[in-house]
Image (spheres, helix red, strand yellow):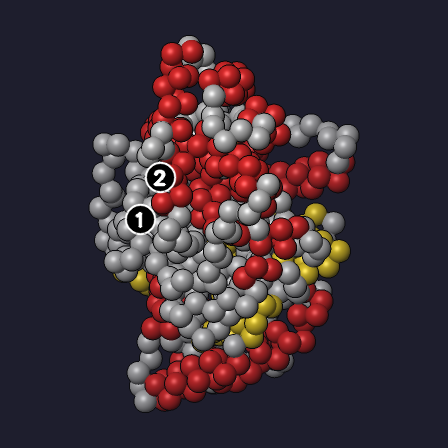
Amino acid sequence: MGRMANPDPLPTPAPPPGPDRLRWNRRRFLAGLSGVGLGSTLLPGVLTACAGDADEITVGMLRDAQALAGLELGDEELEMVAERLNGERNLRESFEGLRDPELHNHTPPSFVFHPLPPGKAMPETAGGMAPSRPDVELPASDTDLAFLPVTHLARLVESGEVSSMELTELYLERLERFDPELHCVVNLTPDLARRQAEQADAEIAAGNYRGPLHGIPWGAKDLLAVRGAKTTWGASPYREQEIAEDSTVYRKLTEAGAVLVAKLSMGALASGDRWFGGRTRNPWNTEQGSSGSSAGPGAATAAGLVGFSIGTETRGSIISPSTRNGISGHRPTFGRVSRAGAMALSWTMDKIGPMCRSAEDCALVFEAIRGADGLDRAVHDPPFRWDAAADPTALRVGYDRAFVEDEIEEDPEDPEATAARRSNQANTRAAIEALREAGIEIEPFEIPDFGIGNLGFVLTTESAAAFDALTRSGRDVMMREPPEESRWPDTFRVQRFVPAVEYIQAMRQRTRIMAEFDEALGDLDLFIGSNLGLTNLTGHPEVCVPNGYHEGSPTSLRFTGRLYGDAEVLTLAHAYQQLTDFHLRKPPVGA
């Protein structure tokens, strides 16, 4: 995600001496086939059988291989392919040239993804912030103080009833006390936090109040680079990594006066909730993982260990852990928040967003982190307007008919998952009725089947490129061991055989789907429901808030908005939280 200083170089191994050199040539052969588009379905074992120990690729080898690639080239055409692969300046040599100098995770490709369908104009909106200013009394207990939303903490800090240093010490103590149960902390940042808190208190005392995040302690998902602190990406090969610059999100929050107290856990290389420190746990039920990959931000925010946190999402990594841990999560429209200085998983899908105790908190944090920085070229961010008193009845709201109305079929292999989905559906129906009673009109809306299943390899192919150096170093096998038990090493190897042509075709199909989904939304501002596979490809924003429980674990109400309709989804989520108190409840761990 953007530019960052070279992390932990992972050099390409040299060709082995002696008889192993023939096996090295086979590896070069596999890379060559992939490069000319012959590898989409070729399995390494079959290719090895085709190639034997030969130093040169023959027409016979290609004839055997093309059947698996779905091609029907004649011998004359295959002779041309073999000649190109074996020629003086063959594709394999070009590929090797691209690996010197080494391409690291921080180097983005030259293409830039934009979620707007062709011919669709950027919305023209006016910016401005009008947050609520609630009357707040200092709670009687430190626990109650720790669980206050940012809107309330900010009022106490601004008035001087509590200092930033007092909040910082409170959250540092709670992080140390509850982490043994939750496994949500990678590293505390106490020295940095105390310096920032001391500065915040001095500025506020001098009348230089920067806004609602000034002096508020927060936690960062451990893929955001912070100078002087380890940034481990949750993976064993990078557990000692330090990156010599600050991510844009960290810099923007520091400029807003926020205080970083911890780097929080993430599933290894942004997948799941297992990392080299263990499995991050759900504070509502520690028998469960906290979901991922923003596992630590979800658990720490829910347990009252930070004022707010920052997560990232490529295909569910903000919404899923926010749901599991019973907090409010906001996945912004693609390209509204710079990813510079953050680990890249998929350049066309990665997004950064807030994970907080309330929807309004998410709006305040989003305002602080959004906007261009000149480093992430994917950022196209129109003005953002937040008014806590906005009238939600003016919104045009739909609900995903299938998500809300269709009967959930029994899964005989996982009856517990069936029961959880049914509870979530029942809680969503109850939430819709509560919103209707508040005067909000909500109509059914149907999402067509866009056939997105064929595009699943876009994410994994981009991730294989992002971690190509790791794969070729052989150090990725460290991630297969407990407690990580990561599937990334095998995924990266498989994705080496995706041809460039098929990847580009998938991106063209993606453009078509973006336009068709935009048309299907019609004049809706947002809809109640969630389709993470679809909307992470199209770049639409989503907000989830807690709306009930299933056997003690939270469920969530989800709102999906139009492109750049972040204010609208946050407005309806905020309206729902004025009708309910689910976001104010405390889990067993932390309470």
**Considering depth in this image, is 193 or 187 the residue closer to the camera?**
187
Q: Which residue is mark 2?
A: 94
- Res. 79 visible in picture: yes
- Res. 534 visible in picture: no
Three-letter code, disc 1: Ala
Q: Dot 2: few (<14), some (14–19), or many (≥20) neighbours within 10 Å?
A: few
Quarter of the figure with the N terminus: bottom left
Location of residue 493 (image quadrant): top right
Circle 1 SS class: loop
From what the image shows, is residue 423 above or below residue 44?
below
Q: Which residue is depicted at the point 42% across and 11% down? A: 75
Residue 228: x and y, percent? 45, 75
Q: Which residue is depicted at the point 36% across and 26% down? A: 84
Residue 308: x and y, percent? 50, 66
What is the number of the mark on residue 555? none
Location of residue 95 (image quadrant): top left
Q: What is the tally of numbered marks visible in this picture?
A: 2
**Considering depth in this image, is 238 or 147 the residue closer to the camera?**
238
From what the image shows, is residue 447 above or below residue 392?
above
Circle 2 SS class: helix
Three-letter code, disc 2: Ser
Tell us which disc is closer to us: 1 or 2: 2
Residue 567: x and y, percent? 36, 51
Circles 1 and 2, Cβ within 8 Å, touching? The answer is: no
What is the number of the mark on residue 378? 1
Residue 520: x and y, percent? 38, 27
* Image position of 415 (left or right of 426): right
